[in-house]
Image (cartoon, rainbow, N blue to C red):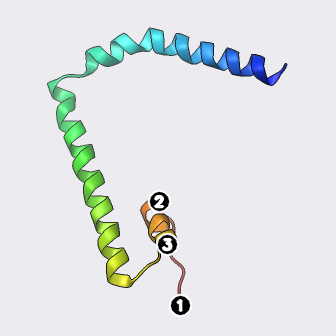
Amino acid sequence: MSAEVKTLAFALFIYALGYMIGPQFVHSLGRATLKQVHLTIVSSVVVVLTVLALTEGFGLDKGTAAGVLAGGRLNRL
């Protein structure tokens, strides 16, 4: 199968899946999920601020800071 046919078939699959699941997803959003959205936003901000503070505190370069943010291990002596 050619790459164009594979790409088109995948796009149609994603469209069909979104068409079926989309209304249920939108309907499930409400006040109950608002607490989870707030928790996600607050925890993301806290994580980024923590990494920024660690970067400044330890004098890390941008690449190491990105690795710490991504969950990478820092192996320095």
| Cα distance in 3D space between marks 1 and 2 | 21 Å
Amino acid type indicated by mark 1: Leu
The Cα atoms of the two marked residues, 3 and 2, are separated by: 10 Å
The amino acid at mark 3 is Thr
Q: How many marks?
A: 3
Specify the label residue 70 is tagged with. Answer: 2
54 left or right, relative to 61? left
Q: In percent of the image, x 53 and y 90: which residue is there?
A: 77
Cα distance in 3D space between marks 1 and 3: 14 Å
Residue under the image location 70 percent in, 22 percent down: 7
Label located before the other in sequence (1 or 2): 2
User: Which numbered disc, 1 or 3, marks the residue that appears first in the sequence?
Assistant: 3
Indicate which label's residue lies in the foreground, 3 or 2.
3
User: Residue farthest to the right?
Assistant: 1
Asked if 10 appears above or below 16 in the picture, the reply is below
Q: Quadrant of residue 22?
A: top left
Q: Position of residue 65 (x, y in %)?
A: 44, 70
Return the residue at label 3: 64
Is the residue marked by circle 2 packed among few (<14), some (14-19), or many (20+) residues within 10 Å?
few
Judged from the image, the secondary structure of the residue bearing numbered disc 3 is helix
Q: Closer to the N terminus: mark 3 or mark 2?
A: 3
- Where does label 1 land, which residue? 77
**Residue that protrudes farthest toward the bottom in the picture:** 77
Residue 62 percent across, percent down from the top left: 47, 71
Residue 56 is situated, as x and y percent measured from the top left of the image, at 33, 78
Q: Quadrant of the N terminus?
A: top right
Amino acid on which the number 2 mark rests in the picture: Ala
